[in-house]
Image (spheres, helix red, strand yellow):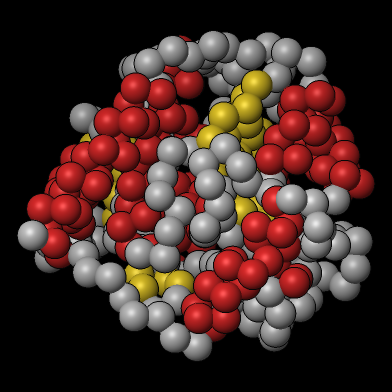
Amino acid sequence: MFRAAQILFASLWLLEATVALGNVNCSSGVHVILARGTGEPQNSSLAGIVSRAIVATIPDSTADEVIYPANFTVNVSLALGVANAQQQIKSYVAACPTSPIVLMGYSQGAQLIGNVLGGGDTHIFGQNSPPNAPLCPSIGSHVVAIVLFGDPNRDLNIGYNADVGGPACNVSSSNPRIGYQAGNITRYADRISEWCQYSDFVCCSTGTTFAGHISYFSGENADTIAQYVAAKAMNATIPKWTPQTPCGDLESSSSYNATTGLTVPSNSTSPSGTSGPVGTASRVTALTGTATPTTFGGSAARFAAGINGGVAAAVAGLVLL
């Protein structure tokens, strides 16, 4: 019964995302794709203030969100989110082959964006996200800026650590990206802006508070990021993409899947235990057949309490720091 419910749940999310991808409007400015944080309602992320600032700053820009659960069953949530985000990016590049893309992620959404670019099998709150193929670099070359807030897999040495308006974290998260994941995401290091406050226990291994995790979304910070994105977009060269464009090289041993347009390390293991490339359909099928909810404890319990007690108020504008 539980397995059937998981399969139905995954199918509904993929169907909703497929319908949403039906119409693509190309922008002469930038197209922002935002992945929201855990517990945030669809289209109601705290990071939305940043999307809106970018759209207001750069003429003829648009913004959209990744459709995914963003819940505490992280292994299921991230698999669906990564599949949908990669398809969303590919669809936009196919329809708008010279248009720039901006990727943003907050909390679990930052982990999701990192998995899109670097590959999956990252760790948070006692769960591993399923392995996934990194985005094909020839498609990723359309991404001109990446902004990550409270990234659970933050690596201090990858990307630019932004001035968060207070002391920034000077160490990595407790679960930084390693190996081929770090290698693949490093190709985007010149356009990654990481926002991690020293007290944010999600992205900073020495952090201790949830308040730090929701401290990024002031109007001043949004304007700063909009100017950062505008500068990146102005100086970017977007190579025209066609379906015949080669994928490009990825870190370590990888194989190119001509059907999905994605690559995956050849030694990766799918959630079902079989080795090799894991495409969108097989990844979700394998996942829904094996995933089980995790009983959270420790920092996850504190995070859940923070979500319940803090984010709702922050959305109402009461506790933005």
Tell which of 114 and 267 is nearer to you.
114
Q: Measured from the top left, where is residue 17 in percent x and y?
A: 36, 31
The image quadrant of residue 237 is: top right
| Relative horizontal placement of residue 170, taking residue 284 as reference (left or right) | right
Tell which of 21 and 247 is nearer to you.
21
Q: Measured from the top left, where is residue 204 in percent x and y?
A: 67, 76
Q: Measured from the top left, where is residue 110 in percent x and y?
A: 57, 55
Relative height, residue 204 to residue 272 (above, below): below
Q: Let me know if residue 229 appears in the view.
A: yes
Residue under the image location 18 percent in, 45 percent down: 8
| Relative horizontal placement of residue 75, taking residue 146 as reference (left or right) | left
Q: Let me know if residue 136 appears in the view.
A: no
Relative height, residue 209 to residue 195 (above, below): below
The image quadrant of residue 49 is: top right
Residue under the image location 57 percent in, 12 percent down: 26
The C terminus - image quarter? bottom right
Q: Measured from the top left, where is residue 131 in percent x and y?
A: 30, 59
Tell which of 11 and 241 is nearer to you.
11
Residue under the image location 45 percent in, 53 percent down: 70
| Relative horizontal placement of residue 79, taking residue 164 as reference (left or right) | left
The N terminus - image quarter? bottom left
Relative height, residue 155 to residue 69 (above, below): below
Residue under the image location 43 percent in, 30 percent down: 88
User: How many numbered discs, if any?
Assistant: 0
